[in-house]
């Protein structure tokens, strides 16, 4: 049995799958660097080095086996970052290569069913981020937004925002994972920002002087359109869970 360690990237994951087939490994556990690794008494440890050629071979082979939506589900499940989800991906992908017709629909298998269920959860979070992200204008005319999604959905929303806000510079920063996506009017790139101590304490960017006025207008609008007599907090929370409220302009105190 082998305990495998990889760099935590999607290409690294595909490389791991390639080598597990190549060397016929029986895998006991998979870890991302620099996670703490629990050594097994009779298990060998191996570090997988990301190889783009091997990763591409696995991806191209999967494209021959699965429709685009099922391919997308695999990537979404990887982005879920659920503990040891790599083991589920490995066993499911191994089954996909078994020669069974339409293997991604074999929901009688627990790993295939779990792939579908988790992909739906990640997709739901992706849709919520499209709806709940609130930009604020910064002093240098950069539009910034802070998010803390349950899953790592930034790679899934970058095209949506680059298409929708192609005429302005913006930054969407995942404070939970400490990285963001930045659009410079030409392309989107992943960035990490060394925030000041003031930001770390208050989670506020350097806003443009007019931003507070626009924020107050937005909050007043929501206050005016709210019909108190028809308030249904339970239903509202179902659509807008409380964990998102801290980054929603309309939920801040006037």
Image (cartoon, helix red, strand yellow):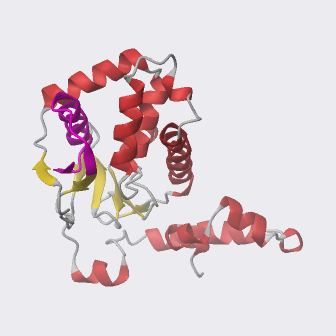
Q: Nearer the viewer, residue 184 or 182?
A: 182
Q: Is residue 218 magenta?
A: no
Mark count: 0
Residue at 87% across / 68% down in the picture?
230
Measured as percent of width and height from the top left, residue 236 is found at 73, 65
Placement of the C terminus among the 4 image quadrants: bottom right
Left or right: residue 188 compared with residue 236: left
**Segment colored magenta:** 1-28
Q: Is residue 162 visible?
A: no
Measured as percent of width and height from the top left, residue 164 is found at 46, 39
Residue at 29% across / 79% down in the picture?
200
Measured as percent of width and height from the top left, residue 8 is found at 23, 50
The image quarter in which residue 58 lies: top left
Q: Nearer the viewer, residue 109 or 144?
A: 109
Residue at 27% across / 53% down in the picture?
29
Q: Is residue 21 magenta?
A: yes
In the depicted structure, whether residue 173 falls above or below residue 199: above
In the depicted structure, whether residue 138 falls above or below residue 190: below
Left or right: residue 232 compared with residue 51: right
Measured as percent of width and height from the top left, residue 3 is found at 20, 52
Left or right: residue 50 compared with residue 70: left
In the depicted structure, whether residue 50 falls above or below residue 28: above
């Amino acid at each position: 049995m082998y305990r495998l360690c990889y760099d935590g990237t999607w290409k690294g994951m595909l490389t791991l799958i390639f080598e597990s087939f190549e060397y016929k490994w029986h895998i006991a556990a998979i870890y991302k660097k620099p996670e703490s690794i629990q050594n097994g008494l009779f298990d060998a440890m191996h570090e997988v080095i990301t190889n783009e050629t091997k990763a591409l071979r696995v991806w191209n082979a999967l494209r021959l086996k699965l429709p685009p939506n099922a391919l997308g589900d695999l990537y979404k499940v990887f982005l879920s970052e659920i503990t040891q989800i790599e083991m589920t991906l490995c066993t499911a992908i191994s089954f996909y290569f078994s020669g069974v017709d339409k293997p991604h629909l074999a929901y009688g298998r627990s790993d295939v069913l779990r792939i579908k269920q988790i992909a739906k959860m990640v997709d739901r979070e992706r849709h919520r981020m499209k709806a709940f992200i609130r930009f604020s204008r910064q002093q240098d005319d950069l539009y910034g937004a802070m998010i803390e999604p349950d899953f790592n959905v930034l790679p899934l929303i970058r095209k949506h925002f680059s298409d929708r806000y192609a005429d302005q510079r913006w930054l969407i920063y995942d404070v939970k994972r400490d990285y963001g996506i930045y659009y410079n009017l030409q392309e989107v790139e992943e960035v990490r920002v060394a925030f000041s101590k003031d930001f770390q304490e208050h989670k506020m960017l350097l806003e443009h002087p007019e931003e507070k006025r626009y924020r107050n207008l937005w909050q007043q609008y929501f206050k005016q359109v709210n019909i108190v007599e028809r308030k249904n907090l339970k239903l509202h929370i179902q659509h807008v869970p409380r964990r998102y409220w801290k980054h929603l302009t309309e939920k801040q105190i006037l």
